[in-house]
Image (tube, coloured by chain):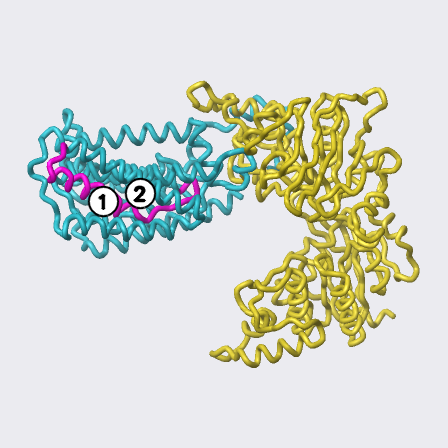
Chain colours: A yellow, B cyan
Amino acid sequence: MQDDVILKISNLSKSFGPVKALRGVDFELRKGEIHAVAGENGAGKSTLMNVIDGILQPDSGEIILDGAPVTISSPTEAQRLGIGFVHQEIALCPDVSVAENIFMSRTNVSRSWLMNYEKLERDAANVFRRLSDIDASVLLRELSISNQQLVEIAKALTLDCRILILDEPTAALTENEAQTLFRIMRELADQGISIIYISHRMVEILDNCDRVSVFRDGKHIVTSDVADITPGDVVNAMVGRIVDKLYPEKQSADETSEEIILDVKNLNEGPRIRDVSFALKRGEILGIAGLIGAGRSEIARGICRLEGAATGEVWLLGEKLALRNYQDSIAKGMVYLSEDRKGDGLFLDLPISENVSALNLDQVANRLGLIRASSEISQAGDLGRKLNLKCGSLSDPVSSLSGGNQQKVALAKMLSVNPRLIFLDEPTRGVDVGAKSEIHRILRDLARSGVGIIVISSELPELIGVCDRVIVVREGRISGEVAGHDMTEENIMRLASVMDAQAVSF
Amino acid sequence: MENAVSLAETQASKVQGVPFWRKLLKMRETGLIVIILALFVVMSFASPYFLSWANMRAMSMAFAVDGILVIGMTILLISGGIDLSVGSVTAFAMVIAGWLFLNGINPWLASGIAIALCAGIGAFQGFFVTKVGLHHFIVSLAVMVIARGACLLFTGGRPLGLFTLPPEFKFIGQGSIGPVPIVIIIFLVFVIAFDFLLRRTTMFRKVFYTGSNEKAAAYSGIRTKKVIFLTTTLCSTLCGIAGIIYMARFGSAQPTFGIGLELTVIAAAVIGGASLNGGSGSILGAILGVILLSLVSSSLALLDVSVYWQDIIRGSILLSAVTIDHYLNKRRR
């Protein structure tokens, strides 16, 4: 078997600042196999794939292609070596035709001065003959997301690649489209192309792949033939850390209270939020689970009036709210921690102290509306101490901090207005394990002190570890609720996915 | 970050920890002042007239009114916008006030109307940017052309002679208190006021938030559209004020005044540290930027360098300033 190994990676490491994304990873890809790569978010899958595609350079370790060590310096170099990568996000030009998109790299290296559109379309039609009945002459923007995804795959197929990396290609595909894709994948594998297939869906992995490698916390855990492994083994390998130590104590029996902090009744907003009702009691941490796009964040943002115009009743501590906008929500003590820290949570190039004060500048200003720098610094200093923020100076820009400390700044920003209820959307995304458990402990302390805490997360172990109760959202509706011993990944996934346990997403 | 420590341990020493002189060294303004002083020294040797009172006065008159435009532009840039219409709108204020005056309206009232109209132009641009959702660049490009057209329409393309302006009105542009021209005093008042407002007030802090990350600002409960609308309006209003001062100074209204002025103004703001991506900039820096550009122009004139070379040199200064800043920023990251 040893001689049909096409790609061998040994002892590969990669760090981003203090975050070790890959720690001495080994990986082996055979000729003509479909090799699934599984792991939780942040396990290092994407980093590894980006290294193989030359987007990232490893800190140490070796990549051996066809028995010879190689340095993959860029995606162009990867392409030359026969490595194709279909990214999860669609990276195509919406304003040009499907055919041009498919052959973009061929056009790029073409020596001809003029575009030969007829030939492009003919060739594209040939590619699609095997894939689907997409018209290659239409503009890309006119296609559905799933068809755009197929164009991405078609594009990769036209490059003569020996190794094809597919990063969650079925996430946006329908069942039929996915089956077509698997058929094509098998054909390609039979032609000798090796496929690395990243997926969260256990069923897909077990039905369509030859081998599976599991990663966790930047380490390679196990590689096995699919025939020799059960879904449970894979999940254990993915999750398999001692969960109890990582998470704070749950709410104890004598801490339960009947006092209701938030009561939402019949929240509706078009197709995104449908008839959502739930309540949050004092002292508990409530989780909201669901697949990406199910409407988890939309519910939180709808309640806070950050977007949309949801109808329905929202009661906060016995008071019926009539919010016009998010400013009103902040004034009532209801705040939302964004899931996208860099995109819309923080002002990266502004000082830490100015980030913390942003929600309510009046707190650090005098009656004339003049900001007192000393108040601003001491506000950030007090909250920073409370959250164990590690930073040089409070006047340094937030971009100088690690992910975990940036998140603490975002959290300090929320706490600056003494909120009565905080929605935390992916509170530990991109945060290292140490800071993660610190943040979880802070959330528990806040809940104990009477602040309402609602956590939205894609990481099921986090929800199960932190929350006292989890409501599950599917297609804008609440599809169920789990608490206590019923709070298991299997139960949550069953409620979150359309087909029982088919679309397992961690 | 290698000496990152927990806040709890070293809070007190860290907050005031950075020595003042080191902060000063890092500031962009310091670098500009050094360059300006160096130019001063070199020029005082190169030309005997350079340090004369008349030359100093002429130079400061040259940048003072443009300085008011730079203030508006800097604030707009910080909020993430840009305005190409400043030159035209300045001329527009001049022309409207002059035209109203020639039609028998009191010059003070005429000036008030002209400034209000300029504010209206700013609001008009703000509307297209925030409500319609067009880009500042395009909207202000269109307004630049429209305002210039309006100037020519009102004047028939010829300058309006305003010899009958009352002396107390001309005093704004031509008079002095003691040795100090009124124009300089107005300029200093604006600079000090806006520098203070921008550094200290909650109102203007929201401008920084909006420009730094509009979405994050909205997620902090800031009405970002309102902020952008107001900075756009402010910029055009300051153009109106500058136009009136120019009119008082020249004693005439020139429809072709300020062609290409927007580029000088943007260049000054950017040399002074304003980012075209929004979120950073300072009034003091921008003013130093305009002083530097003006100093270079008058130095080159004193040295008998052709005006055509002046543009080439000014453009090169802009490019070098921005390039140096780009690399300094990169290293800091």
In the image, what residue type sits under mark 1? Answer: Phe
| Quadrant position of residue A333 | top right
| Quadrant position of residue B66 | top left
In the image, what residue type sits under mark 2? Answer: Ile
Q: Which residue is mark 1?
A: B92
Q: Is residue A367 left or right of residue A477?
A: left
Q: Position of residue B14 (x, y in %)?
A: 56, 26
Asked whether the residues under marks 2 and 1 belong to the same chain, the reply is: yes
Q: Which residue is mark 2?
A: B121
Distance between mark 2 and mark 1 Cα atoms = 10 Å
Q: Position of residue A454 (x, y in %)?
A: 71, 33
Q: Nearer the viewer, residue B287 or A159?
A: A159
Secondary structure beneath label 1? helix
Q: Residue at coordinates 75% horizontally, 49% vertically from top-left? A: A43
Chain where mark 1 sits: B
Residue furthest to the left in view is B164
Circles 2 and 1, Cβ within 8 Å, touching? The answer is yes
Chain where mark 2 sits: B
Any mark on residue A91, and which?
none
Q: Position of residue A367 (x, y in %)?
A: 44, 18
Q: Residue at coordinates 42% horizontally, 26% vertically from top-left? A: B200
- Magenta segment: B77-106
Q: Is residue A407 left or right of residue B229?
A: right
